[in-house]
Image (cartoon, rainbow, N blue to C red):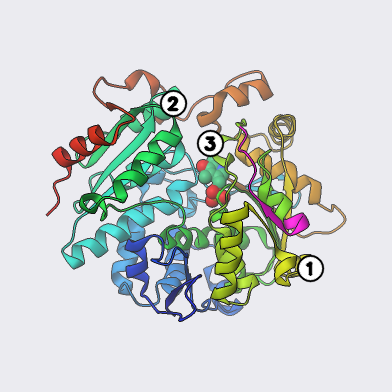
Amino acid sequence: MKMISTRDGSRTARSYTDVLLAGLAPDGGLYVPSEYPKFPLEDLKKLKGLPYRDIAFAVKKKLVDGDIPDEDLRKLIDKAYSEAAFGAVPYGNIVPLMKVEDNFYVQQLSLGPTAAFKDMALQQLGQEMNYELKKRNEHLTILGATSGDTGSAAEAAFKGLDNVVLFMLSPEEGMSPFQKAQMGALSGSNIFNVSVRGRFDDCQDLVKELKQEEEFSKLGAVNSINWGRISSQVPYFFSGYLQAAAHVGDEVDFVVPTGNFGNILSGYIAKRMGVPIRRLIVATNENDVMDKLFKTGVYELTPTHVTSSPSMDISKASNYERLAFDLFDGDAGKVKKYMDEFEKNKKVDLRDYGIGLERLKELGFMSGNGAHAKRLRAIQEVNKKGGFVIDPHTADAVAVGWQYKDKSEDVPMVCMGTALPVKFEDTTKEALGYIPERPKRFLDLEGSLKDGAFYTIDADAEQLKEYIRGNMRIA
Ligand SMILES: *Cc1c(COP(=O)(O)O)cnc(C)c1O
């Protein structure tokens, strides 16, 4: 199995580790495997009940395809999903199912260091990147911009790694005190937090501006189109399936709260590898570009609304291009034409490319959208029926899941739990009337923010360059 770009008709092959360090393909496409490795049911059966790290190893091994030797891959996985990062959990299951009612579950993906599912991918990505850089005797300076969750998850994953230095830009206004404190606590050694007097867009513009200059053109990225991130999310769909299915071979539905289409794409890959997933249900919030796409075939960019599930406040779902590649049966020329039309007109219709809605259904996709009131109700209902508290993003999944749940059939439905409620206490309080007890490690997080944890600059490239030059320690 080799990696190819969604927009490269010549199908130039690259290895897993080259793609790991590369991000976007040079032609602007995304890397996808030339074919999906198969995971036969007999092998799937053998994974049932195993600790997560064993499942992750078995699945990633197929996706890495020998490019990282097995014994090394195993060590990286053990470090990424260590007890220090995820706590001691029964049976080593760091992605447990929590029952809401019969055949309806939430899969908890947020037990990692920053209490969001992004830890699942970034912990592993950090280990793999550092490993590969060491092997090549290279160092990498990463420059990123965050409006919240990605920043802290990336910092927690890269903290203390020898061959990576990370500069993370965040807007001075707009992040919650909790998010600020989470990032601030990670400053130091190879992690540099830069607070920009401006908005998230200003941070992103600064990143783009620097990368266009020769001196900074080699700066790395950790955004969600990175194949290392996507492939590291596939194993928890295997685990969720094995926990939900009464017998290996039975079908299970998954509902995924969707922003950049990364998480659900990983579920689709699990299905393509052979996990008996029946439906992949896309749950959006009020930013419903993807819901409309699956209902009408039209992919149309619309202005982004600010909602109470902010990590899904996205209108362009970058990873969707990987699914489009399959919809067009791997015809890179068609993908390029389709994406170019989207970039140009901010709107493109699958039906103009000969793809009908039934094709999306054939692949298992369905969709629905959430709204603030539906989220509040989902938080209340899950609390009443299941006795636990979910966050607003998970609530979007639950609300959409219930819409599609047919109680007359016994196909289990698993809603992905993408954050702990402690990250979004205002909405939790609005739903339940109280703030649930925080996990111990977050008890006085906001109070711990130290002076100097952030270096503050204007939204000015010269100030940023000077700061990076002074700290980048590149070999
Ligand atoms: C990033 C994020 C999402 C969206 O995931 P995608 O992979 O971008 O679709 C959903 N919920 C939370 C809490 C997130 O942080």
User: How far apart are the alpha carbons under marks 3 and 2?
Assistant: 12 Å
- In the displayed structure, does residue 23 sit left or right of residue 282? left
Would you call the spot at circle 2 few (<14 residues within 10 Å), some (14-19), or many (20 or more)?
many
Could you tell me the amino acid type at mark 2? Phe
User: Can the viewer see residue 360?
Assistant: no
Q: Quadrant of the C terminus?
A: bottom left
Residue at numbered disc 1: 358
Q: Could you tell me residue 33's position as x and y percent? A: 48, 74
Would you call the spot at circle 1 few (<14 residues within 10 Å), some (14-19), or many (20 or more)?
few
Total marks in image: 3
Which of the two marks, 1 or 2, is nearer to us in this view? 1
Q: Which mark is residue 118?
A: none
Could you tell me the amino acid type at mark 1? Glu
Which of the two marks, 3 or 2, is nearer to us in this view? 2
- In the displayed structure, does residue 156 sit left or right of residue 59? left
Which region is colored magenta? 294-305
Please tell me whether mark 1 sits on a helix, a strand or a loop: helix
Please tell me whether mark 2 sits on a helix, a strand or a loop: helix
The quarter of the displayed image where residue 279 is located: bottom right
Residue at numbered disc 2: 178
The quarter of the displayed image where residue 431 is located: top right
Would you call the spot at circle 3 few (<14 residues within 10 Å), some (14-19), or many (20 or more)?
many
